Amino acid sequence: MAFPKDFIWGAATASYQIEGAALQDGRGECIWTRFSHTPGKVANGDTGDVACDHYHRYPEDVALMRDLGVGAYRFSISWPRVIPAGTGALNPAGLDFYDRLVDSVCAAGITPWATLYHWDLPQALQDRGGWTNPEIVGWFAEYTDVITRRLGDRVKNWFTHNEPFCTAFLGHMMGVHAPGLTDTRATFLAVHHALIAHGEAVPVIRRNVPGAKAGIVLNPSPQLPATDHPEDVRLARRGDAMTNRLFLDAVFKGQYPTDLIEIAGQAVDGIDLGAIQKAAVKCDFLGINYYMRWILAHVPGKPEEAVNRFPPGTEFTAMDWEIYPQGLTDMLTRIHREYGPIDIYVTENGAAFDDPEPNNGVVEDPRRVAYLRGYLAAAQAAIAQGVPLKGYFVWSLLDNFEWAYGYEKRFGIIHVDFQTQKRTPKQSALFYKRLIAGQETLG
């Protein structure tokens, strides 16, 4: 089968990962600025201070997208670039930058899709508790109001959050993302406030943007037991509760999974769990970032520990993530069946590999081409099974600052030389271009 004629082919990026200009033109410090400058937090001491210098080079990057033929560009807005302290005084230079970017995207015939929060919280708000402070619901609504008033005449498609699982669990429980906390209660407070903030922001978007469509981006992943051993089954169920149902149940049902509340125990004491019904505002679409599944096996004598046990011969990306396209089909069909979103978009999907350096203007990345073929065929299979999948955004347009991995992991379909900032389309970019143009098949 072919993809529907109105299927949206896009590319995705995130502000802190590509923009650079970390403290230029009035931008406030964000939690990733602070985190990346803390010794030992990011590989090789890398920071996003310059990244891909997209802040200055965005016309070149938009031209690259136009050449690829993508119909949509999913980008995120840096909250501290437009409101340096997170609330209060605006930064005109930051707002002007996003005006110029959106104008450039539109002039190239590309539809802009904006994400309000992709992890670069203003440090000034983190100093006041960040996502653990209930006041952040109001702060986020204020920020949403500012941005949608400014850009809403041109940007009609909006996501509130990118992967609140990562905001909460990687940033507040595991400590591997900013702000680097390892606090179970802070984790659940962050989940709670981020999801309620989503529910508060969607009506603001609709009020300010004529013809707006709004949703949220989640990153669900299959959580499967390695065997039928009761402990493997229990751990898989627990993983599904924390990774998938915690967010999907909140957004679509306005409630938390009962088994998750039992798992959380005292960590949620005193939290008004019933307030999560505010998160279940009706959305126009759901964004799904999909990368991997988990096959969980228990560790004898350690009931809270699990290890990943993959089948022999499994192929992995440079992130040690399993390559298993069927998992995308399985997750899309499950979400359609159990939650029934109006429309679904794959808002991120892609892979890091150890790419060679450019050679005569070409970067050969056949493994990424094969990866994209497999996962796009999996998306096709989901559509054939009735999933209302309306578009696909490849992750990522550019090699970029890959969070705690710094510049070691390259997800881009366009190679970036971080010393010279030279961009070179990879073989995968040319594959994607041909696919969009109807000159390539997945067979």
Image (tube, rainbow, N blue to C red):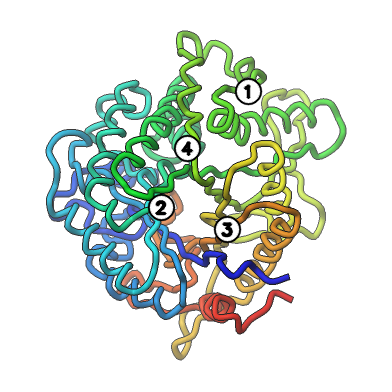
**Which residue corresponds to the image point at 18% horizontal and 51% vertical from the top-left?**
23
Distance Cα–Cα, label 4 vs label 1: 16 Å
Displayed quadrant of residue 136:
top left
**Which residue corresponds to the image point at 79% horizontal and 31% vertical from the top-left?**
232
Q: Secondary structure at mark 4?
A: helix
Q: Which residue is mark 1?
A: 257
Mark 4 vs mark 3: in front: 3
Distance Cα–Cα, label 4 vs label 3: 22 Å
Q: Secondary structure at mark 3?
A: strand
Distance Cα–Cα, label 1 vs label 2: 29 Å
Q: Quick check: marks 2 and 3 in contact, CB under 8 Å? A: no
Q: Which residue is mark 2?
A: 157
Whether residue 204 sits left or right of residue 359 in the image: it is: left
Q: Quadrant of the N terminus?
A: bottom right
Q: Quadrant of the C terminus?
A: bottom right
Q: Amino acid at mark 3?
A: Lys
Q: Quick check: marks 1 and 2 in contact, CB under 8 Å? A: no
Say the numbered circle drawn on residue 164.
4
Mark 1 vs mark 2: in front: 2
Q: Position of residue 296 (x, y in %)?
A: 74, 38
Q: Amino acid at mark 4?
A: Pro
Q: Which residue is mark 3?
A: 390
